[in-house]
Image: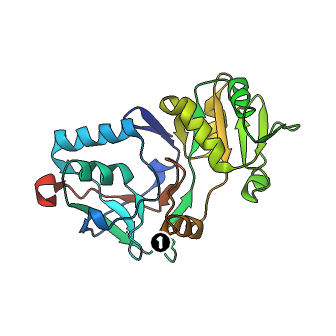
Amino acid sequence: MIEVEFGMSIELRSNVLNKEEKQFPFELVELAKLVPHEMTIDHELESIKQGLIDSGMVYWPLILDKNSLLILDGHHRTKGLGELGYRFTPAVMIDYLDDDLIQVDTWYPIVNVTVEDVISELQKHDLQIIKSEVNSLDMPRLVNREITCVVGNETHLYNIIGERELVFHIIREKWLEGILYADNAEISLKHAGPSKTAIISWSYSKREILDFVLGGDIFLPKTTRHELKYLVGKCNVPLGSLK
């Protein structure tokens, strides 16, 4: 497992070292034509912008759906380039629905507060909270959406039933800058320890994401995690060519 830092956020990635790197062909695409599916995080956006200014380069291409121009990876780069006055971005095009090159999952946030603190906050809202009798993660019920999310660590767990977006809105409003993001549910529980709390939920499907966004809506930050089979090689495009 490696830690990847973006501004003040840290991602815990469990399978990066096992991936083969592949150089994909890329093209320059107009930023104005792209369709975001998630909001950005302010401190991450500022970090990305400063990195672009300091380097004068875009090192990695965006990943886009070739049919809808939905942004699958690179929301902060997209917005950062736009705010810095650039018109184009390098991007790799894939067929989102039909290509098994990319899979969709979610991030599993870990907040730096106790389980009791998180449950206390969730109890203020219209959510059903049930302490788990068996202290193990019930992934089948999560996948089938019988449970909205599981909140806890290796010591104790709670099953939450209610609106998924409400749960994550509460978490991000209260503890956004102290969140770690794990790419694996079990790892998030182990990393939480006795003083932190993992929030584990089901993932939206590709079709749900497209329908939601093309219907005019947008997800909260870190709702989806798009995973390619390969590590995408650098594109190394100078900012001066993106005007």
Left or right of 106: which side holds 73?
Answer: left
How has the structure been colored for display? rainbow
Relative image position of residue 25 (x, y in whole percent) = 28, 70
Residue found 65% across the figure and 22% down from its top: 195
- Total number of numbered labels? 1
Q: Name the residue nearer the viewer: 102 or 162.
A: 162
Relative image position of residue 143 (x, y in whole percent) = 72, 57
Element on which disc 1 rests: loop
Relative image position of residue 51 (x, y in whole percent) = 24, 40
Please tell me in which quadrant of the rendered image residue 19 appears: bottom left
The local crowd at label 1, few if under 14, some if 14 to 19, many if 20 or more residues have their Cα within 10 Å, is many
Task: Tell me: residue 97, above or below residue 226.
Answer: below
Task: Tell me: residue 189, above or below residue 211.
Answer: above
For label 1, the residue is 96
Left or right of 56: which side holds 233?
Answer: right
Relative image position of residue 154 (x, y in whole percent) = 73, 31
